[in-house]
Amino acid sequence: MRRLLLLSNSTQHGGGYLDHAMEEIRARLDGIRRVLFVPFALHDRAGYAKKFRQRLGQEGIEVDELAVDGAGIRQVEGAEAFFVGGGNTFRLLRALQVSRLLGPMRQRALAGVPYLGASAGINLAGPTIRTTNDMPIVEPLGFDALGLVPFQINPHYLDPDPGSTHMGETREQRLAEFLEENDRVVVGLREGGWIRVDGARGALGGLRGARIFRRGAEPEERAAGAPLDDLLAG
């Protein structure tokens, strides 16, 4: 049974690292005392792992840093829970592909090992990373991701500003372009929001809701607390 916690962002304005979601993180990790952290989305992996370890240490939870060598597969196979940090989604996916860890992580997460992530870490939870906001600073071996949920996710979703004089594309326009080429639901998850999944049940949580995009339909608003069971059914 899938047990997921997908955070749009790891730091909320006015608070510290993971503070806004720590109660939910503790609930997702109930009874778990060791987490395998995936720092591949940032260049400074050791510094990133140190930051995460210090924060989770405040909650009495120990942290291991995922390795890219042969030890990585053994770590994934023995993990009690995963937390995939944010950063650049292309770099994250490529590192997992090259180290051949993507498949083993998917198997473990689908088997019920809790999967938590933020930003790039939740792009990875969808079928592909095609709805990331990131620049392709490296070229992955393909765009297919973990497929832990059947819908795409767009973290840090920004609503159009009617008073803006900026002439570039809005996030909504970019997602509309995605739907022109791909018939798949996209969840635009706003800052401070998250998705919790338990098997076939899912719900929005956090400070703000989400905007649901489908091909050929007007975007749909869902508030924090709203169910997502229909989207998990595919």
Image (spheres, grey):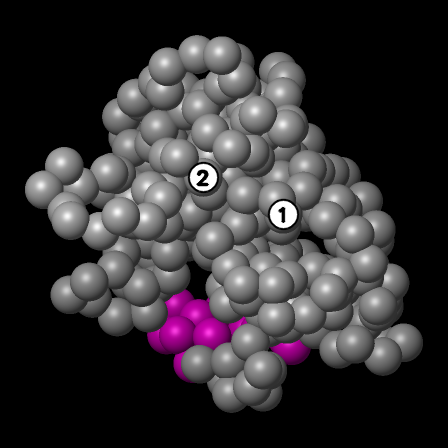
Instruction: Work out whether residue 48 can be spotted.
Output: yes
Locate residue 196 relative to residue 10 in the image: left or right: right
What residue is pinned by disc 2? 174
Nearer to the camera, 131 or 76: 131
Locate residue 138 relative to residue 179 in the image: left or right: right
Classify the position of the C terminus by image quarter.
top right
Q: Residue 18 placed where, x, y %?
A: 35, 63
Q: Is residue 132 above or below residue 226?
A: below
The amino acid pointed to by label 2 is Arg
The amino acid pointed to by label 1 is Ile
Residue depicted at 15% across the width and 65% down the height: 14
Work out whether mark 2 precedes mark 1 in sequence or the reverse, and give the earlier one.
1
Residue depicted at 30% across the width and 21% down the height: 221
Q: Mark 2, residues whose alpha carbon is within 10 Å: few (<14), some, or many (≥20)?
A: few
Locate residue 148 relative to residue 12 in the image: left or right: right
Q: Which residues are magenta?
A: 52-65
- Using the numbered discs, state the Cα–Cα distance from disc 2 to disc 1 in whole angstroms: 14 Å
Residue 64 lies in the magenta stretch: yes
Q: Mark 1, residues whose alpha carbon is within 10 Å: few (<14), some, or many (≥20)?
A: many
Residue depicted at 51% across the width and 59% down the height: 134
Q: Are marks 2 and 1 in contact (CB under 8 Å)?
A: no
Q: Residue 154 placed where, x, y %?
A: 46, 42
Q: Residue furthest right?
A: 70
What residue is pinned by disc 1? 129
Residue depicted at 24% across the width and 38% down the height: 160
Classify the position of the N terminus by image quarter.
top right
Q: Residue 36 placed where, x, y %?
A: 64, 66
Q: Which mark is residue 119?
A: none
Element under disc 2: helix
Element under disc 1: loop
Locate residue 119 relative to residue 183 in the image: left or right: left
